[in-house]
Image (tube, helix red, strand yellow):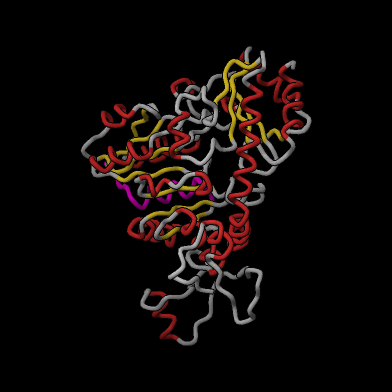
């Protein structure tokens, strides 16, 4: 099914209608193509497909109709020229790095990145001669000062995980482009339903589709979306190295995108209500949520995001012991490090998502022992308040 080029379609329509290619059976529900390979009409067609002279599917490590459908839909929602799906969010970041960098190159990254991303940049890539400078996420001068002659990539996550720091995408894009580098934005927390980094000057967007794009905690997936010149290089890496998204996972994410906006709006509204309540609790030292006027980047967040998102973090008075008490006292909220689910989750970042980075790196990122992160789902907010109040002594 080809969408009409002469109709300027709303993102809500694109979330439902883009990426659909019906088979000869004319199905209304989207098909799932669980196959490892594809049959050719003759040897000449096989040769043409393998060489790229003819478009078409070859082998599911790098081409599959279901994966293509998911890529097409996400590209449409992000306003990207193209998209490449990967096996997970971390494999998306790795694929971008492998496609755009080489030994001797340099990355400028915000220090508020997800723990595994910090380990990838500061640990694994450094073994291959790619260095990373981590800078304060909101300090624009720090980004400028970190630039080197071989700086090729700026990488930011906004809002950050878990402190929800908001980075000025347009300003960092300008700094990156003046340095002759690309700007990549991890858009996991907001998704295109709340924020479109490419419209603000970013060159590429990275997703952990495992989170809100799926939306129900079912499958792993990742994606890199942006200009074709970039995604083609990512595709070449994926074709050879194989961090491939399975057709089943692609189908689940493809269907999840249909309800993305309404989920994000509902979960963001609930998160704002919960954040306001947390600010009134005697056992809470500080709440981190971009939708609150108390957030340091509240005005910026309201300019470049449609809402504050669904992640609320807060410092509990009393350090790790008090924070663990809150976690252990929950009877409804799921104790898990995943986020983006319709079920609300809670985690202690210092000993889970950021537990493998050094204590110095955690301190630089502002992640203390009393910090908790709540990813708000679709339950009744009053029930979530009651569940947290039990451990907070409220």
Q: Residue at x 46, y 58 (%)?
A: 75
Instruction: Locate the N terminus by quadrant.
Output: bottom right
Describe residue 367's horizontal placement relative to residue 394 as left or right: left
Instruction: Locate the C terminus by quadrant.
Output: top right
In the rendered image, the vertical position of residue 208 relative to residue 285, given as above or below: below
Q: Which residues are magenta?
A: 88-104
Q: Residue at x 35, y 55 (%)?
A: 230
Camera-nearest residue between 103 and 167: 167
Query: Residue 310 placed where, x, y %?
Result: 59, 37
Task: Kindly give the residue lying farthest to the left in the view shown.
Answer: 149
In the rendered image, the vertical position of residue 42 relative to residue 386, given as above or below: below
Q: Residue at x 40, y 80 (%)?
A: 47
Describe residue 233's horizontal placement relative to residue 285 as left or right: left
Describe residue 212's horizontal placement relative to residue 300 as left or right: right
* Main SS class of the magenta portion in the image: helix
Residue 198 part of the magenta segment: no
In the rendered image, the vertical position of residue 322 relative to residue 357, given as above or below: above
Residue 98 part of the magenta segment: yes
Camera-nearest residue between 273 and 352: 273
Query: Residue 120 placed where, x, y %?
Result: 44, 39
Task: Kindly give the residue lying farthest to the front in the view shown.
Answer: 7
Is residue 356 in sight in this rendering?
no
Query: Residue 130 placed where, x, y %?
Result: 32, 40
């Amino acid at each position: 099914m080809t969408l009409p080029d002469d109709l300027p379609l709303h993102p809500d329509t694109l979330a439902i209608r883009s990426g659909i290619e019906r088979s000869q059976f004319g199905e209304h529900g989207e098909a799932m193509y669980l196959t490892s390979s594809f049959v050719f009409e003759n040897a000449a067609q096989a040769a043409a497909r393998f060489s790229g002279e003819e478009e078409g599917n070859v082998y599911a490590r790098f081409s599959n109709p279901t994966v293509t459908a998911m890529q097409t839909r996400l590209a449409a929602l992000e306003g990207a020229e193209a998209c490449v799906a990967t096996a997970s969010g971390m494999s998306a970041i790795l694929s971008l790095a492998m496609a755009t960098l080489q030994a001797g190159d340099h990355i400028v990254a915000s220090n508020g990145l997800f723990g595994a991303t910090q380990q990838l940049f500061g640990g694994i890539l450094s073994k291959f001669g790619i260095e990373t400078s981590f800078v304060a996420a909101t300090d624009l001068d720090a980004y400028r000062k970190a630039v080197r002659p071989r700086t090729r990539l700026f990488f930011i996550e906004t809002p950050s995980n878990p402190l929800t720091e908001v980075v000025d995408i347009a300003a960092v894009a300008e700094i990156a482009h003046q340095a002759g580098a690309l700007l990549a934005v991890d858009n996991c927390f907001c998704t295109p339903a709340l924020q479109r980094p490419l419209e603000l000057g970013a060159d590429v967007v990275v997703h952990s589709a495992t989170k809100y794009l799926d939306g129900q905690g079912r499958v792993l997936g990742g994606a890199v979306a942006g200009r074709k010149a970039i995604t083609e290089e990512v595709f070449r890496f994926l074709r050879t190295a194989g961090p491939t998204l399975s057709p089943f996972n692609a189908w689940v994410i493809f269907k999840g995108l249909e309800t993305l906006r309404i989920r994000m709006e509902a979960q963001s509204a609930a998160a704002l209500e919960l954040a306001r309540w947390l600010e009134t609790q005697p056992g809470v030292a500080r709440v981190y949520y971009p939708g609150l006027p108390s957030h340091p980047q509240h005005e910026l967040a309201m300019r470049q995001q449609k809402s504050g998102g669904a992640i609320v973090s807060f410092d509990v008075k009393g350090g790790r012991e008090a924070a663990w008490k809150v976690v252990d006292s929950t009877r409804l909220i799921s104790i898990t490090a995943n986020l983006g689910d319709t079920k609300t989750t809670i985690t202690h970042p210092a000993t889970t998502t950021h537990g493998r980075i050094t204590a110095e790196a955690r301190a630089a990122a502002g992640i203390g022992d009393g910090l908790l992160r709540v990813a708000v789902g679709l339950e009744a907010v009053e029930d979530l308040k009651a569940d947290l109040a039990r451990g907070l002594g409220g």
